[in-house]
Image: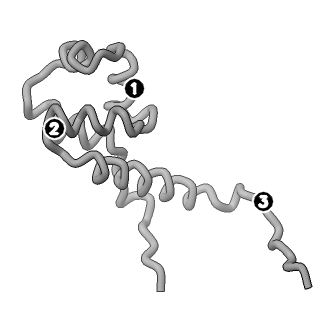
Amino acid sequence: MALKIHPTLTVHVGDWLKTEIVEPAGVSVTALAEHFGVSRQALSTLLNGDTGLSADMAIQFEKAFGVKADTLLRMQTAYDFAQARRNEADIRVEKSVRAA
């Protein structure tokens, strides 16, 4: 039996990074963006949950804060999948017929 994660139990990795890593470290979004070599807007949209985490950015967080990149990417995938499940009624695909 597959475990089904309810969408309300998932958190966007950007929000988690903001509240659990960036804010406790006392670093500003502007300073962290400069440290990572990205725009403040790009980092802000991630931390506000408006865009997904890339593998490159996950590695940057790993190097800067020690949180494992693969863990962060699994969090992003779980969030994305939960959102897709929430909207699965909108996905219209007929069952495929196997060739004889």
State the mark number for residue 31: none
**Residue on which the image places disc 2:** 21
| Helix, strand or loop under label 2 | helix
Q: CA distance from mark 1 to mark 3?
A: 30 Å
Q: Where is 97 relative to 89, above or below?
A: below
Residue type, mark 3 in image: Arg
Residue drawn 39% across the image and 39% down it = 55
Name the residue nearer the viewer: 64 or 77.
64
Snapshot quadrant of residue 90? bottom right
**Location of residue 38 in the rendering, given as x and y in whole percent from the top left corner:** 34, 17
Q: CA distance from mark 2 to mark 3?
A: 39 Å
Snapshot quadrant of residue 19? top left
Q: Is 41 displayed left or right of 82 in the figure? A: left
Residue type, mark 2 in image: Ile
Quadrant of the snapshot with the C terminus: bottom right
**Location of residue 39 in the rendering, given as x and y in whole percent from the top left corner:** 36, 13
Q: Where is 43 relative to 53, above or below?
A: above
Instruction: Count residues near mark 3 (Cα–Cα under 10 Å), then give few for <14, some for 14-19, many for 20+.
Output: few
State the mark number for residue 45: 1
Name the residue nearer the viewer: 73 or 89.
73
Residue drawn 33% across the image and 44% down it = 13
Residue type, mark 1 in image: Thr
**Location of residue 68 in the rendering, given as x and y in whole percent from the top left corner:** 22, 48
- In this rendering, the label closer to the viewer, 2 or 3: 2
State the mark number for residue 92: 3
- Which circle's residue, 1 or 3, is located before the other in the chain? 1
Residue drawn 48% across the image and 58% down it = 82
Q: Are marks 1 and 2 in contact (CB under 8 Å)?
A: no
